Image (cartoon, helix red, strand yellow):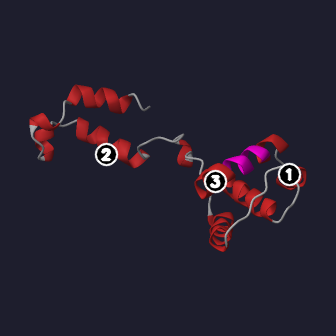
């Protein structure tokens, strides 16, 4: 089984995310890693968190590979790891309704049809 050894800084960061994040999956991953650092068995962690053992194993392995970055889901506000935030998408849609010149951009700066196609392919 994979053993995790956390630095004091990692423990502190994980505790903060466990207590403050509004995203349940980040809380669960943080708690799983903190418990595994205390040498709690994966099966027991899965029982406490009401998750499948394989999920916990995957989270632990992912943490050993990517450390703190592994706890982030990329799915805040159901954007499913979108490169642009919802607000950015709205701003771009509003911008695309006008010509680049209206925003003070030279015509050569972007090609509206290509940009529009690119932006709307994210949805």
Q: Residues within 10 Å of mark 2 (few under 14, many from 20)?
A: few
The answer to whether 112 appears left or right of 20 in the picture is left
Label of residue 117 in the image: none
Earlier in the chain: of badge 2 and badge 1, it is: 1
Mark 3 nearby-residue class (10 Å; few <14, some 14–19, many ≥20): many
Q: Give the distance between the C-alpha atoms of the residues marked 2 and 1, in whole angstroms.
A: 45 Å
Instruction: Report the disc number at residue 71.
Output: 3
- Magenta region includes residue 119: no
Residue beneath disc 1: 42
Nearer the observer: mark 2 or 3; the answer is 3
Secondary structure category for the residue under label 2: helix
Image location (x, y in percent) of residue 86: 43, 45
Inter-mark Cα distance, 2 to 3? 29 Å
Residue 35 in the image: x percent, y percent?
A: 80, 62
Q: Nearer the viewer, mark 2 or mark 1?
A: 1
* 106, 87: nearer the viewer: 106
Image quarter (top left, top right, bottom left or bottom right) of the C terminus? top left
Q: Which residues are magenta?
A: 57-62
Residue 52 visible in rendering: no
Q: List the residue tagged with mark 2.
A: 91
Residue 8 spot, x, y in % from top left: 67, 73
The residue depicted at 24 percent of the width and 36 percent of the height is 96
The quadrant in which residue 16 appears is bottom right
Q: Are marks 3 and 1 in contact (CB under 8 Å)?
A: no
């Amino acid at each position: 089984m994979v053993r995790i050894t956390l630095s004091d800084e990692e423990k502190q960061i994980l505790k903060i995310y466990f207590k403050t994040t509004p995203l349940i999956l980040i809380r669960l991953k943080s708690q799983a890693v903190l418990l595994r650092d205390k040498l709690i068995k994966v099966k027991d962690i899965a029982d406490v968190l009401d998750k499948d053992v394989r999920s916990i194993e995957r989270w632990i392995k992912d943490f050993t590979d990517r450390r703190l970055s592994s706890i982030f889901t990329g799915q805040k506000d159901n954007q499913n790891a979108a490169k642009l935030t919802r607000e950015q998408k709205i701003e771009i849609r509003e911008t695309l309704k006008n010509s680049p010149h209206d925003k003070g951009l030279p015509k050569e700066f972007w090609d509206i049809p290509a940009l529009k196609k690119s932006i709307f392919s994210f949805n």
